[in-house]
Image (tube, coloured by chain):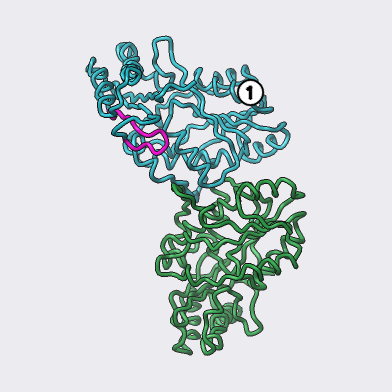
Chain colours: A cyan, B green
Amino acid sequence: MITVTTLTELRQARVSLVEPVGLVPTMGYLHEGHLSLVRQARQECASVIASIFVNPTQFGPHEDLRSYPRDLPRDLYLLANEGVDLVWTPSVDIMYPAGFQTWVTVEEVTSRLEGSQRPGHFRGVATIVAKLFNATVPHKAYFGQKDAQQAVVIRRMVQDLNIPVQIVVCPIVREADGLAMSSRNVYLSTAERQAAPLLYRALQAAQDAYNEGERSAERLRQIMQSVLAETNLAQPQYVSCADPETLQELDWVNERALLSLAVYFGKTRLIDNLLLPEQE
Amino acid sequence: MITVTTLTELRQARVSLVEPVGLVPTMGYLHEGHLSLVRQARQECASVIASIFVNPTQFGPHEDLRSYPRDLPRDLYLLANEGVDLVWTPSVDIMYPAGFQTWVTVEEVTSRLEGSQRPGHFRGVATIVAKLFNATVPHKAYFGQKDAQQAVVIRRMVQDLNIPVQIVVCPIVREADGLAMSSRNVYLSTAERQAAPLLYRALQAAQDAYNEGERSAERLRQIMQSVLAETNLAQPQYVSCADPETLQELDWVNERALLSLAVYFGKTRLIDNLLLPEQE
């Protein structure tokens, strides 16, 4: 496995990779969710690039950029173990040198859900992902369904800007008790960690109602809210039943729907989601 | 020469081009300025793509989108004559389909000169050029020094977003009397056309003063203003002596400077520029 830092090193190493090339962009502190992306890329592509970069421009001024967990030696060990060919670990100065002033913005689909709670977040995401694509020139790029809106935003950007890459979105990987894997789970206290599977239970309760014929989006949102109300450790920020592409809140679930929610446990913000009807 | 319209046709045709590939993006109604870009591309690249697209998003609501001159048959004849391999003539619906919502914005360098007079212009330019690059995947792309700020904006975008393309900026091509070639010159009345070489004379007067030792940017701007004042057909919009990279107005010309100006002749807006010291 080759590990590179500068753009020049990356471009040199990229030339010698057998194509097609798959890219797995990450912020490091890898868990089974990330590794499932790597495995899918490994199956579908002749070469796999992983990037590790905690992107400052997607964090708000009061968010957890400084405390975001990092463990590069462990990450490199895990990636080598999965047969990754090339790891790119650029510095902030490499990605955002003095004079940097170009941004990619996706408009409508970023105005809702995470976008409405985290102003500027998706501008940072779209910009860094465009840079990662341009720098690594992958044929396929792998993202987790965990960040459902991010996947929608990136697909939209790729389509709108004609970026020649295929976006692959992989299913959420969960702990045994249903909690969606996230690098931020380490922030949780023992009590919070015990309560956190509530997010998935809320989604499942709405899914059960849907499977029994409930089609009122408002009723599905209420069902999720009532599960989240079971403990005062959970402070819901939003609960949504929306169109999976436009992310507009639905009145009725006619075809597909994205159930999603964001919940604070103390200072830790967790998100989770589920697509209706269930995917194969 | 192959002519294609859809993105699918383009991608198919692109695959069979011998590399390296040069791209000459145009809005059509070609003149010798465009053809000089094609010739340079022809010299430096194994294959040459030209695009013809009058990009609506770079025109302001009161600008000349509707009346912008068009002559596709003549353009295709001229491009075939220069040995272009592939011409892409997408429609507005192909470039901006329903639901389009992603924009590339370059910030500081677009706040001045053309950008300050034409709000949104460079957002449209950066977005369409990013799309053209992603769709055609060129090794080199050719732009005219005539649109000096555009060249700065595109170079900045390419650097900031790590787009793997080399930007080549070619010298301004002028009529015998010094008027910079422009598709918009056809708008000029006979009297306006006769007066229009004034722009280049203003630039030359400032250049002469510079060559004689003048280093006050304000004095160079005054010299240009005073030449433009020779006829009341010319209504200057701005006259600038700026840093060629940041485009900030200079107090003193220590190293290089970009002299530039925008002048209305009736409803026709002309621009021109000159780099100090003179380029080889």
In-image side of A164 versus B92 (left or right): right
Number of numbered discs visible in the structure rendering: 1
Instruction: Judge by depth and name the residue closer to the eye, A62 or A156.
Output: A156
Q: Quadrant of residue A69?
A: top left
Where does the image place residue B202, in percent across and percent down from the top left? 54, 82
Say what secondary structure mark 1 lies in. Answer: helix
In-image side of B16 versus B55 (left or right): right
Where does the image place residue B25, in percent across and percent down from the top left? 62, 60
Where does the image place residue B99, in percent across and percent down from the top left? 44, 47
Give the residues in magenta. Answer: A237-249
Q: Which amino acid is tagged 1?
A: Arg
Which residue is rendered at x = 68% and y = 54% of the image?
B140
Which residue is rendered at x = 62% and y = 17% of the image?
A81
| Residue occupied by mark 1 | A42
The answer to if A95 sits in the magenta stretch is no
Instruction: Judge by depth and name the residue closer to the eye, B59 or B178.
Output: B59
